């Protein structure tokens, strides 16, 4: 395991940290923007690591290739927001997925530029660390300036913390252990994961802004009742659930070789549960298949049901 850090800079951090470091990205959206030969592998790996379907991401420029090509899963990347004053290093990224090839289309989707094609995936751990303190921790000279680059910290600089594991535990209050994931066991979300799921509203708003007219027209055409199970948010939750429903693409772009325009025939309205369930398979099951499952389950409970 290695420790890296990236000097992002105040402008870039202010613009992009909220998008993918402190905001989450849908694994489906990630898969849509990958080369065909990577789609299945990346989707499968990230889904195992992040069962809720969302993760954080960061990318570095092509110029960092000589350093970033050595990055591996289970390494840790610290992100520098600013080195001004005492500086600020607010994010610790425990890498769970990284493919050593440039992904300019994904970079453009995530950050509006193809200049950050080496993209890695993780769950952000917020930390309270200054640039000044970090330099003291790793024995860098006070005048050292990272100048927007990516660096790997030599292991011997962390000897007083007993290596990278010890330093990470130190940064996170000693409550976080770096472990190689065991895919033979079911991974249960911890409290941090539950909080991250609460941020899905941020992602959902971002998704809708990509096709605002399509979503608006779909809501007008199909209404706010789940087309799979009939769930009505307003009837269940009252005013807070009024005019709420999720828009599902029947043919996810992540499962197509090319980006294609969508029409009302390509979408349907689903409640949150049905939307999650329909994506539990790959390729995603059809609306008719999900309806069939629901009918079967109802009939098991009530064999006289004709729903």
Image (cartoon, rainbow, N blue to C red):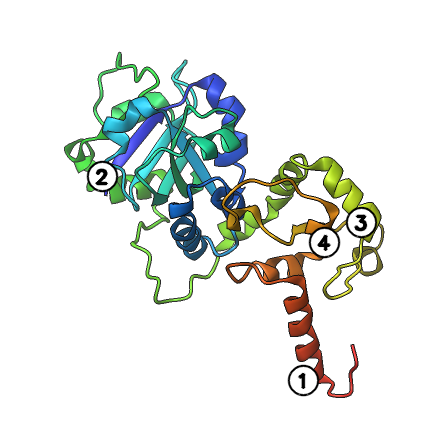
Mark 1 to mark 3: distance in Å?
A: 33 Å
Where does the image place residue 102, in percent across and percent down from the top left?
Answer: 36, 33
Residue plotted at (67% across, 84% down):
300
Secondary element at image label 3:
helix
Q: Indicate which label's residue lies in the foreground, 4 or 3.
A: 4
Q: Which residue is mark 2?
A: 161
Q: Which residue is mark 1?
A: 300
Q: Which residue is mark 4?
A: 268
Where does the image place residue 186, in percent across and percent down from the top left?
Answer: 42, 66
Secondary element at image label 4:
strand
Q: Indicate which label's residue lies in the foreground, 2 or 3.
A: 3
Q: Residues within 10 Å of mark 4 (few under 14, many from 20)?
A: many
Where does the image place residue 44, in percent across and percent down from the top left?
Answer: 42, 55
Secondary element at image label 2:
helix
Task: Work out whether 283 lies above or below 166.
Answer: below
Mark 4 to mark 3: distance in Å?
A: 22 Å
Mark 1 to mark 2: distance in Å?
A: 58 Å
Q: Which mark is residue 240?
A: 3
Secondary element at image label 1:
helix
Which is more N-terminal, label 3 or label 1? 3
Left or right side of 181 for 283: right
Q: Mark 1 near mark 4, Cβ–Cβ under 8 Å?
A: no
Q: Indicate which label's residue lies in the foreground, 1 or 2.
A: 1
């Amino acid at each position: 395991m290695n420790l890296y850090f990236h000097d992002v800079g105040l402008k870039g951090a202010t613009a992009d940290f909220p998008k993918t470091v402190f905001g989450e990205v849908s694994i489906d959206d990630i898969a849509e923007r990958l080369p065909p030969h990577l789609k299945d592998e990346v989707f499968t790996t990230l889904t195992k690591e992040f069962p809720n379907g969302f993760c954080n991401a960061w990318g570095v420029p092509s110029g960092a290739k000589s350093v970033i090509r050595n990055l591996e899963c289970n390494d840790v990347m610290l992100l520098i927001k600013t080195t001004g004053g005492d500086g600020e290093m607010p994010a610790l990224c425990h890498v769970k997925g990284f493919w050593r090839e440039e992904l300019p289309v994904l970079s453009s989707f995530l950050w509006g530029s193809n200049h950050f094609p080496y993209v890695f995936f993780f769950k952000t751990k917020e930390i309270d660390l200054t640039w000044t303190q970090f330099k003291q921790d790793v024995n860098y000279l006070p005048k050292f300036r990272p100048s927007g680059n990516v660096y790997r910290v030599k292991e011997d600089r962390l000897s007083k913390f007993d290596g990278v594991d010890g330093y990470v535990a130190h940064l996170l209050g000693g409550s976080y252990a770096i472990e190689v994931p065991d895919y033979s066991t079911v991974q249960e979300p911890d409290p941090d994961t539950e909080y991250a799921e609460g941020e899905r509203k941020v992602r959902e708003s971002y998704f809708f802004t990509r096709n605002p007219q399509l979503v608006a027209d779909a809501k007008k055409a199909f209404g706010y009742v789940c087309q799979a199970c009939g769930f009505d948010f307003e009837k269940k939750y009252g005013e807070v659930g009024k005019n709420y429903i999720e828009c599902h693409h029947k043919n996810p772009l992540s499962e197509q070789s090319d980006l294609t325009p969508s029409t009302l025939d390509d979408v349907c309205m689903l409640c949150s549960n049905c939307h999650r369930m329909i994506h539990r398979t790959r390729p995603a099951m059809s609306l008719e298949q999900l309806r069939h499952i629901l009918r079967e389950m109802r009939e098991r409970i009530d064999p006289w049901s004709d729903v």
